[in-house]
Image (cartoon, grey):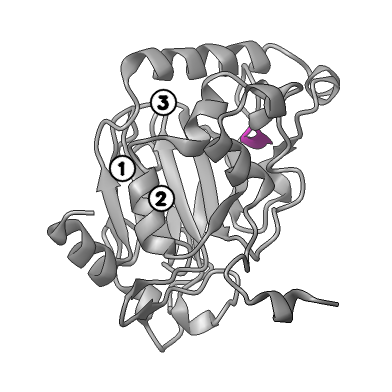
């Protein structure tokens, strides 16, 4: 991070990274998703993907079913391989992760989300909730965040399209967020919508209160979420399952991020004996 980014990440709990995904990889990802969305749920499951409709998500406000295409849903994505594997150790964000987490870390989840008109996400999390798996922390030597997420925009998304939204500074608040459980109102003075163009990313602490305003536009919002945590944390269910042959083609760093590094490799040998 630059000095300014470091200051803003500590102050606000997030940093917006512009144009971290170039047009060729964006096109490849959207083409892959187009092909997936032409498949029914059974065909998707046969490819080792898990498509879940947002009606089962406790944070989701679900809009009316579209006349054509799929309803709002999320899905595992790494079994698609290709560009989605490349994002695991994406050079544009890896230095940010190394600084924000501060210890050996791993990928603990990767997913894709699609939202149509009417869909939104209520505010959730905030430091006052004291969730051990998402804690924002800073010590004398630097950041020690327990969970960092990166939201990659695969399409242009303005406020009217239901963009990602935060309450800046809530990752350090000691009082409960009065807006938790509500779909963000972009006009509220506490609320900061974060419009993005395709290829932009929001790098944020999971302890930050975040959600998404209601999609009132005609465009479908497509977003990838990649989540990273210290090595001692486990992966979230199926969200790190990969495509066949991943182990043989992955570079060492990418393989380590999926499988997890040794979390306590600096311990004296005498402490590792059973």
Of the image marks 3 and 1, the number of the one nearer the N terminus: 1
Q: Residue at x 82, y 17 (%)?
A: 43
Of the image marks 2 and 1, the number of the one nearer the N terminus: 1
For this rendering, which residue is in front, 216 or 22? 22
- Does 230 appear in magenta? no
Spatial CA span between label 2 and label 1: 7 Å
**Are circles 3 and 1 on residues that touch, CB within 8 Å?**
no
**Helix, strand or loop for disc 1:** loop
Q: Which residue is mark 2?
A: 213
**Helix, strand or loop for disc 2:** loop
Crowding around mark 2 (Cα neighbors within 10 Å: few <14, some 14 to 19, many 20+) is many
Determine the image quadrant of residue 195. Answer: top left
Give the left or right position of residue 207, taking residue 19 as reference: right
For this rendering, which residue is in front, 24 or 216? 24
| Location of residue 21 in the rendering, given as x and y in whole percent from the top left corner | 35, 27
Decide if residue 197 is in sight here.
Answer: yes
Q: Residue at x 34, y 52 (%)?
A: 96
| Location of residue 135 in the rendering, given as x and y in whole percent from the top left corner | 50, 74
Q: How many marks?
A: 3
Give the left or right position of residue 136, taking residue 142 as reference: right
Q: Residue at x 52, y 68 (%)?
A: 146
Q: Which residue is mark 1?
A: 159
Decide if residue 112 is in sight here.
Answer: no
For this rendering, which residue is in front, 211 or 78? 78
Which region of the structure is painted magenta? 71-77
Crowding around mark 1 (Cα neighbors within 10 Å: few <14, some 14 to 19, many 20+) is some
Q: Which residue is mark 3?
A: 218
| Location of residue 250 in the rendering, given as x and y in whole percent from the top left corner | 60, 28
């Amino acid at each position: 991070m630059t000095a300014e980014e470091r200051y803003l990440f500590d102050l606000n709990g997030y940093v917006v990274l512009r144009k971290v995904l170039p047009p060729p990889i964006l096109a490849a990802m959207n083409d892959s998703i187009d092909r997936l969305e032409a498949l029914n749920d059974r065909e998707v499951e046969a490819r080792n993907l898990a498509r879940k409709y947002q009606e089962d998500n406790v944070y989701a406000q679900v809009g009316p079913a579209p006349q054509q295409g799929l309803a709002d849903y999320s899905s595992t994505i790494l079994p698609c391989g290709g560009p989605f594997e490349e994002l695991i150790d994406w050079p544009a964000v890896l230095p940010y992760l190394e600084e924000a987490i501060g210890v050996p870390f791993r990928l603990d989840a990767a997913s894709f989300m699609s939202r149509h008109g009417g869909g939104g996400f209520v505010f959730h999390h905030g430091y006052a909730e004291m969730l051990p798996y998402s804690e924002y922390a800073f010590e004398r030597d630097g950041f020690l965040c327990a969970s960092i997420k990166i939201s990659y925009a695969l399409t242009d998304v303005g406020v009217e399209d239901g963009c990602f939204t935060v309450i800046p500074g809530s990752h350090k608040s000691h009082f409960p967020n009065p807006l938790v459980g509500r779909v963000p109102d972009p006009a509220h003075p506490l609320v900061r919508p974060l419009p993005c163009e395709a290829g932009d990313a929001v790098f944020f602490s999971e302890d930050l209160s975040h959600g998404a305003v209601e999609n009132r536009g005609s465009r479908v919002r497509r977003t990838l979420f990649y989540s990273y945590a210290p090595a001692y944390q486990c992966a979230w269910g199926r969200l790190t399952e990969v495509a066949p042959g991943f182990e043989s083609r992955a570079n060492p760093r990418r393989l380590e991020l999926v499988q997890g590094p040794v979390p306590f490799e600096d311990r004296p040998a005498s402490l590792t004996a059973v």
